[in-house]
């Protein structure tokens, strides 16, 4: 039997492929769930709740626009904008109404904030922003900031994830071979030809590298280490990129150069007193740990820290978190196990993902919501310039053509034009007819079919594709399902005692429903209330 790299290292090829695919599907499931959930907020049976939600989105848009614009200016009062942004956003997340925000902005105790506060108050008045507080038992699956971000710029977040290729067998095989080959050359450099220049080394094919590995198996030590290294490398190429995207989506103050996992850094507090130790637990962190089936890990950390507190009589009150790191090889295995147990059924196959993405853009264009919302800065007339009235609805054929053009330019091709960052510059000019000869593709090309529409045959196929859209954004459809039901189902399954614990502190990010900006992330104390 011919030896291959998998049999040589005792690797289960099917297992590696399945684990990688499950990690990839978990990533897309999380992103698509929040994108659909955000848009379903406009479909609530209680219209006042839908209006209230939209007003909160307008408030965050105002803050975000002011923060982005003023942070680049040299005016002295602009140094206050981050502090104001912190506090107003915390009030929104805490379900306070606009009256509470106005009270804060009118507060004259902190005089150096006044110029910035007055600007925001004036803009609130111009935008007619007003919303009532929500009840203490109001249930919400994501932070308002995350919902705004995925509404305002879904193209940005989806295109970032498109940098990760679909993990087919060819991609996995190349990763296995390249990881092993790099290990071999770093530890046995003499195996390389002395006459081989760096360019020749880089140009070696996957087949050539695999052959070199197999010819030099006798020089390789620590084959178990190589197995871990391969799975760790897969966790790296999926997890790290996704973590950046999820952090940008979840944390308005995320700093890529100094990333911080805030969620579980202060889970419980031990306060020594004369005759007792008071132990308090953060409710939000505790609920998340339950849903991630990590209570055993929490109990282990608490047991250790309580012992230390008892032996150290002079200890002051301290916060404790979960900082245990897992090796990345086991993280890939754990993510796969967690996804198998808790997958929601949003999609089952890779080829179902493009249709969900298309349905999100179709909703935004049809109803001028999300990234095409005029109240988020979009110029509606740019899509209705062939209509006598810019407020007239778009025809179905127009909607499908626009969706297909956006997919082609940004989710199939990787269009890097500077104007793409403007809501009114996203290829509105030359929307359909463009020269892509100098434009690169995304590494993930699963949207290719959805970006073809030029000739008559392709145009007919395009129309057919939109006839069979998912029902998640059509409340009149018999199969309509609220995403909140799927999220609750995932939490319940993850909380089962037989569920695999979700790997904390690994390359993989937390589920987006666990990554919540909260009032605990800002300096000023606000009334204690679980959002």
Image: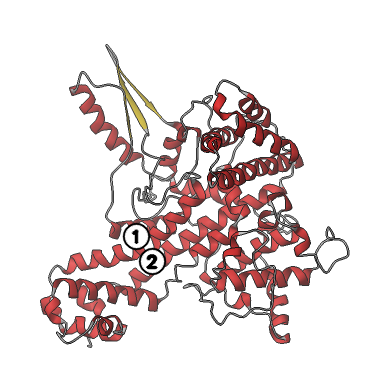
Badge number at residue 20:
2
Q: Residue at x 75, y 61 (%)?
A: 366
Corner quadrant of residue 120: top right
Give the number of callouts: 2
Q: From the image, which quarter does the C terminus lie in?
A: top right
Badge number at residue 332:
1
Q: Residue at x 28, y 48 (%)?
A: 325
Q: Residue at x 34, y 69 (%)?
A: 15
Tell me where residue 476 appears, x and y as whole percent: 75, 56
Local secondary structure at mark 1: helix
What is the residue that sits farthest to the right in this orientation?
388
68 sits to left or right of 401: left
Please rate how many residues cluster around mark 1, counting C-alpha atoms within 10 Å: few if below 14, some from 14 to 19, many from 20: many
Residue 141 visible, this angle: no
Compared to 434, does 264 lie above or below? above
| Nearest to N terminus: mark 1 or mark 2 | 2
Compared to 26, does 199 lie above or below? below
What is the residue that sits farthest to the top in this orientation?
274
């Amino acid at each position: 039997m011919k030896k291959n790299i998998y049999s040589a290292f005792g690797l289960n090829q099917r297992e590696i492929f399945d684990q990688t695919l499950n990690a990839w599907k978990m990533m897309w499931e999380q992103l698509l769930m929040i994108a659909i959930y955000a848009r379903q907020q406009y479909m609530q049976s209680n219209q006042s709740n839908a209006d209230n939600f939209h007003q909160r989105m307008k408030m965050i848009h105002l803050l975000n626009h002011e923060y982005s614009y003023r942070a680049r200016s040299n005016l002295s009062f602009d140094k206050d904008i981050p502090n104001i942004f912190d506090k107003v956003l915390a009030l929104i997340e805490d379900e306070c109404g606009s009256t509470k925000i106005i009270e804060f902005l009118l507060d004259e105790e902190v005089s150096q904030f006044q110029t910035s506060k007055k600007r925001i108050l004036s803009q609130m008045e111009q935008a007619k922003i007003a919303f009532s507080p929500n009840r203490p038992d109001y249930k919400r699956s994501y932070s308002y900031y995350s919902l705004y971000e995925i509404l305002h710029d879904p193209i940005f977040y989806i295109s970032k994830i498109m940098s990760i290729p679909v993990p087919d067998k060819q991609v996995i095989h190349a990763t296995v071979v390249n990881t092993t080959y790099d290990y071999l050359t770093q530890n046995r450099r003499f195996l390389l030809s002395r006459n081989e220049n760096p360019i020749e080394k880089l140009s070696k094919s996957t087949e050539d590298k695999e052959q070199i590995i197999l010819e030099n198996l006798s020089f390789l030590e620590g084959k178990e280490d190589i197995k871990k290294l391969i799975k760790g490398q897969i966790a790296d190429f999926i997890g790290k990129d996704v973590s950046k995207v999820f952090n940008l989506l979840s944390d308005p103050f995320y700093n890529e150069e100094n990333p911080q996992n805030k969620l579980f850094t202060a889970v419980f507090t031990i306060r020594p007193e004369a005759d007792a130790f008071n132990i308090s637990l953060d409710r939000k962190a505790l609920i998340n740990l339950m849903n991630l089936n990590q209570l055993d890990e929490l109990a282990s950390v608490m047991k250790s820290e309580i012992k230390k507190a008892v032996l150290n009589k002079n200890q002051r009150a301290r916060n404790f978190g979960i900082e245990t790191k897992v090796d990345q090889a086991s993280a890939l295995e754990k993510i796969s196990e967690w996804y198998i147990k808790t997958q929601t059924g949003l999609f089952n196959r890779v080829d179902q993902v493009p249709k969900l993405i298309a349905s999100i853009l179709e909703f935004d264009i049809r109803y001028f919501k999300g990234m095409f919302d005029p109240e988020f800065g979009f110029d509606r007339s740019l899509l209705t310039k062939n209509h006598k009235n810019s407020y007239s609805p778009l025809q179905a054929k127009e909607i499908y053509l626009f969706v297909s053009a956006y997919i082609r330019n940004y989710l199939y091709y990787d269009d890097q034009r500077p104007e793409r960052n403007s809501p009114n510059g996203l290829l509105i000019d030359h929307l359909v007819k463009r020269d892509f000869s100098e434009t690169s593709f995304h590494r993930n090309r699963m949207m290719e079919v959805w970006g073809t529409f030029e000739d008559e045959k392709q145009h007919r196929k395009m129309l057919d594709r939109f006839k069979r859209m998912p029902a998640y954004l059509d409340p009149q459809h018999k199969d309509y399902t609220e995403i909140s039901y799927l999220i609750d189902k995932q939490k319940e399954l993850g909380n089962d005692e037989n569920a695999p614990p979700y790997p904390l502190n690994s390359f993989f990010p937390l589920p987006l429903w666990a990554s919540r900006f909260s009032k605990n992330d800002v300096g000023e104390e606000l009334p204690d209330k679980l959002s």
